[in-house]
Image (cartoon, grey):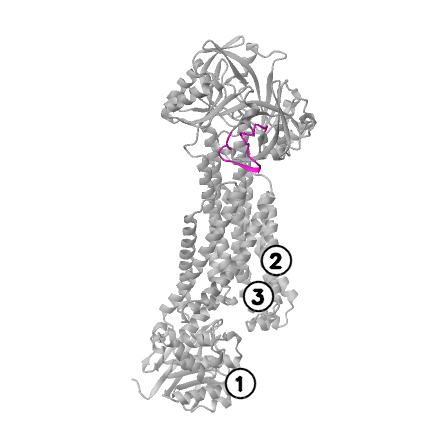
Amino acid sequence: MTDNNFCISVQDVTKTVDTPDGELDILQNISLKVRYQEALVIKGASGSGKTTLLGLMAGLDNISSGEIILLGQSIADKTEEQRSGIRAGKVGFVFQSFQLVQGATALQNVMLPLELGGDKNAAEIALTSLQQVGLETKKDILVDLLSGGEQQRVSIARAYAVRPQILFADEPTGNLDAKTGQQIADLMFRLRDQSGTTLILVTHEAELAKRGDRQVLLESGRLQGKS
Amino acid sequence: MSGLPKIQSYWLMLIATVITVAIVNTSQMITQRISLLLDRQASELLAADLVLASGDPFADEYSQQALKLGLRLSRTISLRTAVFLENDVQLVELKAVDALYPLRGHLEKTVDLSDDKTRVQVGPIAGEVWIDSQLLALLGSDVALGSSSLTANWLLTYEPDRGGTLFNLAPRILMNLADLPATGLVVPGSRVIYRLLFAGEQSQVSAFSTWLKPRLREGETIQDLENARPEMRRALERTRQFFAFSIVLTLVIAMVAIAITARYTASREAPKVAMLRAFGISQSRLFRFYAWQLGKVWIIATLIGIGVGWISQFPLQWALDGWFGKELPPVTALRPYLVAAVVGFISLAGFSLPYLVNVIATAPMQVFRHISSPQSVRRNLLVSGSAIVTVFLVLIILIQSSKLAIATLAIILVTALLLPAIFSLMINLLLYSGPRGFWMRQYLLSRLKTSTRGAVFVMSGFSLALLAILLIAVVKDELLSSWQTQLADDIPNYFLINIPAGDIAGIRQFLKARKVQSSLAYPLVRTRLTHINDRSIKEIEASSHNSAHLLNHTFNLSFARDLPDDNAVVEGKWIDPDSGLAQMSVEKGMAESLQLAVGDTLSFSVGSDVIKAPITSIRSVLWENFKPNFYLIANRQLIEDLPQTWLLSALINDNQKHDLRQLLERFPSVTLLDITVLMARVRGIMKRASIALEFFFLFALASAFIVLFAAVQTGRHERQNETALLRALSARTSHLYQINVFEFTLMGTLIGLFSALFASLSGWIISVYFFQIDYHFSPALWAYSLASAIIVLTIAGTLVGRKVYNISPMKILRS
């Protein structure tokens, strides 16, 4: 059963992996719902399962049990190909380590998801997106030559270029110094406010976590407090 | 350091080293055995491994020593005598042979020239003689030889050691040595040539030759391959050179495989090494550990490689036995095993250690953060320099011909330097041209351009492997077909020699009337070289066997208005037929042996006459084309009045052979020489070498497979990350499939194009400059190259690529 007010619904999800010492539950009985345009922060210590939960919510991996509804569609029993189809044009990502295509320019990196989605005006949209993050003058520079902060701005421009309904951000300031991290966080929330995109942010930084509409805490694979 | 990788982690490098050791071991064993066989083939031209000739009987000590060393021995005696042929006197070359003759090779006889010939291992029995076709009229009758009368039962059609050149022949009568005393032809003062023929193992022959040389008396000469038929010698030399060259190319692929797998292994080990260094483990300790791991790889690879090599000789021997009709001579020496082990060690150390040193010397932070340092150039130089030294050392060990070794090294170096530069250039050109869209062309090219992917290195390595395969497979066919063209079925198969000048017109008319194709007729004037630049040849010390032979040789001097077929003037100017000045053209090999140059003056004795002429040109001669070829050609005016006979060659097919009897009856002084057997032998040698090469081709393919495997494995980690990222960015499987096919098709196209280009260039250089054969542009080579590179790479790449299609995009969050 789906609820149109929620873009993601996680119901009693468990993620188990095989280890040399037997099965290990990374996440146990997680249930939570995310409203459209909400900024949800998942926080927790290192190894608590934050990134795994983000990945499962985005359909980047299979759950072991439970149910996840992403944008009105169950992704629990879907193949990677089908999940990719559900994400296409509706979901954006910002990664801790930027994950840009090295050897390509800033503009080309932003164009990539647009072209994968078959957008004919990829170059124009990508340029607009770069303007929004203040990098239009560096559009033709190879990303390898940009600073860490600039690379993360390209990554944000790439994520927003497809006008996603949901933006998943995994420790977006984790690889940056405090000042640059602050600028990146400002940029991300500004764009989110402008676009009304749902933001699901994973971080262990308390200051950044406070900027979300709602915070959930993960401890040893279990959700603490109210979800 | 129990956490470090075990020997199993190096299995790709291990297989590449096993193949290298196996190639060297097999090639060393087989080359040695084929060489022995080719020597034996050559020996058949002498009917022995070594022949001693003299005008006087030999001292018994020669035979005793030979027998003591375990050699087999045969005796022949040759002399000129005359027989009555249809009421006319005919000069003949009588040769008396014992029951062991020939020690090498065989004889062929027939009763009818148009019938099949019978191949036999022994000569005439007592009481009979075998006669040349020129003496056809005597067949079946008794031939009076001195005081004896012997029955001519057979026509002799092939005799392995008949003469130093094709044309020095009076008609032959072969008889049993036991009948010779009764003829009374050999008396003190007779002009007789005694020959002792020896055969045995190479070491025995060599020991005997060493013992014999200081004991030779005046007038005694040793004959060996050097003064056997030039056309056969050239064919053997070329075959050996081509054989050695192909083995080196096979080895190059194996070394490329080691280089690529070493790089792949090093790149995989880099994060572990960086981590261990971060934990404080010293560079020297890490180096010792990895050096020991490489040592284990070498020991295991050497043992397996030698085993594979040892086993490989059996199928090859089986394949070749059919051709040779006898077992390949055994190899007992340890050398093949030692050389294989040494080459394996040099190759493994030379290609792996630089990568190992680089990985260990790289600061851990650079590895963790994937950044290059200013020392990268120096490290690349270390890898390149070490590779060059390695290839050079291996070539020095394996190639006997320094010219070929240096040329091969140069070609490999130029190719190895040019290919990466060309591939980088091509990728950049493609990257900065074409439509603006990023996906998928620009995306792929930008990925190929990054050094972490190693695409340029892999493309260069695979291209070098393909180039070597093309050179072996296609250029081999080119060379063989060029040889075959020279020995085409429609080239003359008979020489008509000893033609009196007055019969030339009649013979030509006879042949024309029967539609027999024939060549130009050439005169032959028998001469001896007496002086070089007014210095008597008796004062000239021979610098080699060959020069000694040439100095004592009876030459057939000819004259010609035009340069004969397949001759090329390499120095000076061809004879000006109208100048009337004395001019001489000398064959290149003879000029080199006797250190002759244009401008030198040669003097010859012809009976009581002396002729003198300056050398005006030096010619290369394609001896193995079986056309009339000459060491010396003069201008017409110089020799036209001297005593001469003429020769011409003709293509006489099976239907026309019935006319041969009529020809010999009408022109009784003419000797008919069937060279079909000789031509078949040259063809046979090439075919045998070709079979052996095809066997090595299997090793080449195995190496190429390792190169291919390492090529598609290299950058797999990168490809997995790319796939995960593309998946996170919502790429469909069709996108991943397209990019994968596009990547390998593009790489295959570039590799195929440049391999074909380099193979064509190398093939041209090798054909023209080393094998002196015309090179024909081969569209097939381009087709093979493109098709094989694209098909093989795309299929292999797609199969490997499929494994990463289903990779979880979570990997990108975890990286």
Above/below status of B276 relative to B403: below
| Circle 3 residue | B4
Residue displayed at 55% across by 49% down: B21
Amino acid tagged 3: Leu
Sequence-wise, which precedes: disc 3 or disc 2?
Answer: 3
- C-alpha gap between disc 2 and disc 1: 45 Å
Dominant SS of magenta comes to loop
Q: Position of residue B742 (x, y in %)?
A: 40, 63
Residue displayed at 42% across by 61% down: B746
Discs 1, 3: same chain:
no
Q: Position of residue B51 (x, y in %)?
A: 59, 26
| Circle 1 residue | A180
> What element does badge 1 sit on?
helix
Residue B594 disc label: none
Residue B385 disc label: 2
Q: Residue furthest front?
A: B579
Report if residue B579 lies within the magenta region. yes
Q: Write down the region rendered in magenta.
A: B561-582
Looking at the picture, tell me which residue is in the foreground, B634 or B535.
B634
Res B339 visible:
no
